[in-house]
Amino acid sequence: MKIIVLKFGGTSVGTIEKIKKISKIVTSFVNKKYKVIVVSSAMSGVTNDLINKSRKISDNFNTSEYDVLVSSGEQIACALISGRLNHLGYKSRSWLGWQVPIVTEGTHRSSRIVSIFKKRVLAYIKNGGIPIITGFQGVNFENRITTLERGGSDASAIMIAKFFDAEKCIIYTDVEGIFTTDPNITKKAKKIDKISYEEMLEMASLGAKVMQPASIQDARLNRINIDVKSSFKNIPGTLITKRKNINKNKIITGISFTKNDSKVTLIGVVDKPGVAASIFEPLFKNAINVDMVVQNISADGNKTDLTFTVKSEDLNKVEKLIKNNKKIRFKDILITKNVSKVSIIGVGMITTPGVTYRMFKALSKKNINIQVISTSEIKISVLINKKLVTKAVSTLHNEFKLEK
Ligand code: ASP
Ligand code: MG
């Protein structure tokens, strides 16, 4: 039995016309003798709208009711898709997360799928039915409805592909695939044919918004091949797969960037064990994500300067938490808003020396000042003035010949 999972994002089911169009994609696979499982997100805008409603009810809306509320958009989309398939003469029905059931663990709003009971859905498929399963939702051990974090229908599709042993998982979206960088920044941006899980994970968490980062990690752990492609243009997309399947001739695969970061520097922090932990403890407790961190020894050797970056929307909170933190002492706090992190990503850099140098050199030729640097095995990130992002990305795109 050839099982295929087709996942449709919000824009792919955003209108009745679009639902009619994607229903044809579904039937085309049925006609090719695939057993199809459809996973759908809510119609675009619906989830945001529901979240806004919850905010108007209370600024402290109960999280288990939040999950009941915001997961309801998926129910609507799935009923409409199966309704259309019925109309076209196919056997199809919707399945809500709890009906499958898709069992999750963790807290409300950010649960993770731990198991999927496939017996009933499988029987339905074997009898020629097309199940349309709600993305984004699950049910926990207390029998309450849960959700998987924003964008979580990607994770639903990938875990369904895993539990049903699908041959493939196709993520249908409103772009043609994964690009070397944001096409709005440079026209030279090119669609990537194949990208490794590791690279995609970096691209997704560093700002390329096509897929939910957590879902890529699920795919990587379970070795699920993912095809990302357009719902509306029938052309090849991008395959996300393991490194072995990719013949590498490029050093850099893609360039991503963030838009709204801020840099915080604490000058003259006492240099003794535990200080960094004391600085970051309240940030962690308030669920604030700290990104780049750099520590320097200051001239006298007893004090240190510590720099880190956060999302600009968290900045006010961070400033308050630092200033009210009785456990730490420092001479001064410097804040720079409007910085951006630009990252080059590629497994090729593991085996190629000199990539860092080439990146810095190319930026310096364009007079772009680097404020903070961080690296991992397959990525180099620099923090720069936000105004220079377009210039930096285009420069690096040329330097590493990504348009070729
Ligand atoms: N509808 C949900 C959201 O907007 C889940 C998804 O789109 O993947 O976050
Ligand atoms: Mg999405």
Image: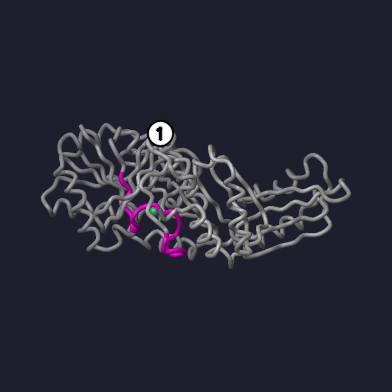
Does residue 378 appear left or right of residue 188 in this picture?
A: right
Residue furthest to the bottom: 387
Residue furthest to the right: 300
User: Is residue 81 inside the magenta stretch?
Assistant: no
Count neighbours of disc 1 (C-alpha within 10 A) and say few if under 14, some if 14 to 19, many if 20 or more. Answer: few
Query: Which quadrant is home to the N terminus?
Result: top left
User: Is residue 175 inside the magenta stretch?
Assistant: yes
Residue 62 visible to an observer of this rendering:
no
Way the structure is coloured: one colour
Does residue 370 appear left or right of residue 331 in this picture?
A: left
Q: Is residue 104 above or below residue 253?
A: above
Query: Amino acid under label 1?
Result: Lys
Residue furthest to the left: 89
Q: Which is nearer the eye, 52 or 246?
A: 246
Q: Residue 171: where, in percent of width, then height?
A: 33, 48
Q: Would you say the beta carbon of the disc 1 residue lies within 8 angstroms of ligand 2?
A: no
Residue, x 59% and y 65% (percent of image)? 386
Residue, x 26% and y 57% (percent of image)? 233
Q: Main secondary structure of the magenta part?
A: loop
- The residue carrying mark 1 is 244
Tell me which segment is drawn in magenta. Answer: 170-188
Q: Residue 205: where, in percent of width, then height?
A: 51, 49
Q: Is residue 222 above or below residue 200?
A: above
Q: Is residue 378 above or below residue 313?
A: above
Residue, x 20% and y 38% (percent of image)? 35
Q: Residue 230: where, in percent of width, then height?
A: 30, 55
Q: Secondary structure at mark 1?
A: helix
Q: Which is nearer the eye, 210 or 160?
A: 210
Q: Which is nearer the eye, 315 or 347?
A: 347
Residue 205 visible to an observer of this rendering:
yes
